[in-house]
């Protein structure tokens, strides 16, 4: 049985920063960004956690091409580092590497913070390393509190605001799952959507048993109508989601059949003479690219 070749050498090596050649130029806005500041503070406080990804550029001079980690390299240069931990890639191109990266989900970040705290790292130290307020670290640590296991499973690979968890805690477990499924189906895991779903949640699905404060500019009658419409929308959305694949298949089959039919000169001539409006509609169906087109 053939072994799958490794993409990187298993050992981390140390390379002088002067010997690492960037493969692209970072935008001028990077040094002032929040992400850059967080990375810089993290490296300054706890060191480099994730090695740079490099490939050999010139073995004679010891030059390496940087495949991933340009922001980390810039931060280390600014902090006066002389060397960097690196993983040596067997391929000298960055596309494959970057296309296979799995970014940390919000839940993974939470578990890493919890593990760090359990090992004795203070919240102040973590906040300083991440360049955030201590209250933000505390929110991350308590992220899963009040969230049912089924909802956590749905969110395990997602990135989302910690404030969404605050909204979900006000709902009962079944409603938490419903709202997350709706947000994921709509590809809109946002705070605004979560707040709208909370506002449209029936009282019996809320933990407190009372509705939250009314949304500004929305009357009680409008809120009640929103609840009814949201409930109807949820049912329709799930029905569409369940039938979408079958509908697309039917559309493809119908298009193929109609295209062949309209290629027949006798059929085309008959339809255009007897029902020109129907012929135009059939042409539109053949030209459809998706179910979204009207």
Image (cartoon, rainbow, N blue to C red):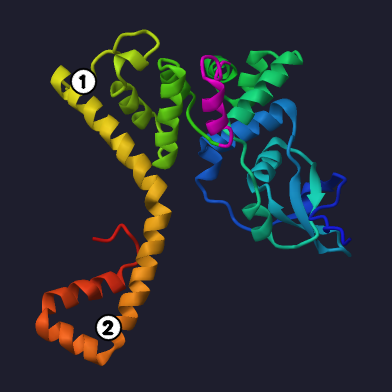
Residue 135 position, x and y percent, is 53, 14
Tell me what residue is drawn at x 73 percent, y 39 percent: 50
Q: Is residue 205 above or below residue 190?
A: above
Residue 94 position, x and y percent, is 67, 58
Along the line of sight, the residue nearer the viewer: 239 or 186 = 239
Residue 255 position, x and y percent, is 34, 72
Residue 49 position, x and y percent, is 74, 34
Q: Name which quarter of the figure residue 141 lies in.
A: top right
In the rendered image, the quadrant that contains the C terminus is: bottom left
Q: Name which quarter of the figure residue 260 lies in.
A: bottom left
Q: Which mark is residue 262?
A: 2
Q: Is residue 159 left or right of residue 89?
A: left
Q: Nearer the viewer, mark 2 or mark 1?
A: 2
- Residue 186 in the magenta stretch? The answer is no
Tell me what residue is drawn at x 58 percent, y 32 percent: 156
Tell me what residue is drawn at x 25 percent, y 91 percent: 265
In the rendered image, the quadrant that contains the N terminus is: bottom right
Tell me what residue is drawn at x 83 percent, y 48 percent: 15
- Residue 150 in the magenta stretch? The answer is yes
Along the line of sight, the residue nearer the viewer: 194 or 293 = 293
Classify mark 2: residues with Cα within 10 Å, few (<14), some (14-19) or many (20+). Answer: some
Q: Disc 1 on helix, strand or loop?
A: loop
The reply to whether residue 163 is in sight is: no
Magenta-tinted stretch: 142-157
Q: Is residue 221 left or right of residue 123?
A: left
Q: Which mark is residue 216?
A: 1
Q: Name which quarter of the figure residue 259 lies in.
A: bottom left
Q: Is residue 20 above or below residue 31?
A: below
Q: Is residue 7 above or below residue 132?
A: below
Q: Which mark is residue 25?
A: none
Q: Disc 2 on helix, strand or loop?
A: helix
Tell me the distance, in whole angstroms, between the alpha carbons under discs 2 and 1: 56 Å
């Amino acid at each position: 049985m053939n072994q799958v070749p490794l993409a990187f050498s298993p050992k981390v090596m140390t390379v002088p920063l002067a010997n690492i050649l960037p493969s692209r130029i970072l935008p001028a806005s990077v040094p002032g960004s929040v992400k850059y500041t967080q990375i810089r503070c993290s490296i300054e406080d706890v060191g480099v956690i994730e090695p740079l990804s490099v490939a050999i550029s010139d073995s004679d001079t010891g030059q390496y091409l940087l495949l991933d980690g340009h922001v980390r390299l810039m931060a280390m240069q600014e902090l006066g580092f002389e060397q960097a931990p690196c993983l040596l890639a067997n391929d000298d191109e960055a596309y494959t590497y970057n296309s296979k990266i799995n970014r940390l989900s919000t839940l993974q970040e939470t578990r890493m913070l919890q593990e760090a705290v359990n090992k004795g790292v203070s919240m102040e130290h973590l906040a300083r390393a991440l360049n955030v307020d201590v209250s933000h670290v505390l929110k991350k640590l308590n992220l899963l509190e009040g969230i049912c296991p089924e909802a956590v499973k749905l969110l395990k690979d997602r990135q989302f605001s910690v404030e969404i968890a605050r909204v979900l805690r006000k709902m009962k477990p079944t409603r938490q799952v419903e709202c997350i499924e709706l947000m994921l189906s709509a590809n809109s895991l946002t705070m605004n959507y979560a707040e709208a779903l909370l506002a449209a949640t029936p009282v019996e699905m809320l933990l407190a048993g009372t509705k939250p404060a009314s949304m500004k500019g929305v009357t009680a009658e409008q809120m009640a109508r929103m609840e009814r419409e949201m409930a109807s929308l949820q049912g329709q959305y799930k029905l569409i989601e369940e039938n979408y694949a079958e509908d697309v298949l039917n559309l493809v089959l119908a298009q193929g059949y109609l295209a062949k039919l309209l290629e027949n000169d006798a059929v085309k001539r008959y339809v255009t003479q007897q029902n020109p409006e129907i012929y135009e509609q059939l042409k539109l169906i053949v030209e459809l690219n998706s179910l979204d087109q009207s």
